[in-house]
Amino acid sequence: MVPHLTTALNGPLLELERRFLDATPDIERWLRGQWQEHTPPFYGSVDLRNSGFKLAPVDMNLFPGGFNNLNAAFLPLCVQAAMSAIDKICPDAKDLLLIPENHTRNLFYLQNVAQIAAILRQTGLNVRLGSLLPEIDKPTPVDLPNGTTLLLEPLVRSKYRLGLDGFDPCAILLNNDLSAGIPDILRNLNEQFMLPPLHAGWAVRRKSNHFAAYDEVAGEFAKLVGIDPWQINPYFSVCDSINFHERQGEECLAANVDAVLGMIREKYKEYGIDETPYVVVKADAGTYGMGIMTVKDASEVTGLNRKQRNKMSVIKEGLAVSQVIIQEGVHTHEQVGDGVAEPVVYMIDRYVVGGFYRVHAGRAKDENLNAPGMHFEPLAFETSCSLPDQCQNPDAPPNRFYAYGVIARLEQLAASLELERTAPVEE
């Protein structure tokens, strides 16, 4: 199923997809060269927005939580990609410890954990689950809606290693984004591979660092295929020293909103785009669609009411927001049924392994879809994101999905640069 695209496909997007199609050998060769110089994160998911005149990423998650939403037909791709990743890191790996998020009541999330474990077991690994929750003090089974059971076990720490009772793994895979900080039990594990590294968690990571890296990647890629980098890259700026409760930083926020909106208006004028520019103000660290607001005029961020300030001031785990990113809003003109939709592309290592659509019937094309009321269309990507078909139109399903896959891989490359540059200096 390909979602309905509400714009007429004879304009910039069709031309963008045609460029990708024509440059496929160059794109694949360039990406192959990049992966010889940079190590991709173990896995990741990319939120894309397709406006009909622009195809751009708006978020990159290094601890993806929706593997259960992928088309089951893509399981072999997932297994092959995971094998490649494990071979590079620890080719003799036998045992792997998987550490999930702490919300054990979210059964949909735990089905994702079960799917990750199933993928890794298919690579020949013994996979067991260790929980950071203090109340998990003995092996605890959790029954899932699909009839399977997860076994969560208490972690056991020695001086330089982490495992479970009778289980000493070669590698540790985090599916916990560390929003609440890096627990001591995960620190100084210098004898085991930690995937992704601890500084990939939200305790350290910042979206602005990621999109600064993506800005470089998109600029280089745009030269390669002969496009305007803006067509695949959202403008952004940053405000720090923000305190929404105390109304600190409102002037910085308003000035940056105004500046980014001004840059967008210039581009809309250049391309003859008849849309209302907007920006998305969101916490520079964090996930789950929290701490986000859509803004169309700088006046909207001064004098926020109490409800708005409360919404923006905290994110997951109740952490206070002190820095925000002001990101160009990208309209989504894709629809699935009666709902506005955006593609989410999943990657393991440097490979696209599938995707789905996030759909929200109660939101508009210029609003955040990662909100209560959304649902996923897990069967959306019926063809791989890696196999364009030169014999079909640029917007035929394999070719649109190929374009999605290209942008997702650019994001994975940006994430690898981001992690290289933010790695702590070893003493």
Image (cartoon, rainbow, N blue to C red):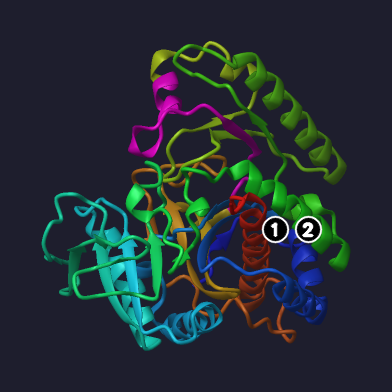
Which of the two residues, 291 or 395, is positioned nearer the viewer here?
291
Question: Mark 2: few, some, or many residues within 10 Å (few <14, many ≥20)?
Answer: few
Location of residue 418 in the rendering, given as x and y in whole percent from the top left corner: 65, 54
Residue 297: in magenta span? no
Q: Residue at x 77, y 76 (%)?
A: 33
Q: Is 153 situated above or below 243? A: below
The residue singled out by tag 2 in the image is 11
Q: Residue at x 57, y 43 (%)?
A: 206
Question: Mark 1: few, some, or many residues within 10 Å (few <14, many ≥20)?
Answer: few
Residue 318: in magenta span? yes
Which residue range is magenta in the image? 308-333
Going by the numbered disc 2, the residue's amino acid type is Gly
The residue singled out by tag 1 in the image is 8
Q: Are the two marked residues, 2 and 1, in contact with CB atoms closer than 8 angstroms?
A: yes
Location of residue 422 in the rendering, given as x and y in whole percent from the top left corner: 62, 50
Q: Is 425 situated above or below 45? A: above
| Quarter assignment of residue 224 | bottom right
Location of residue 34 in the rendering, given as x and y in whole percent from the top left corner: 74, 71
Q: How many numbered markers are drawn?
A: 2
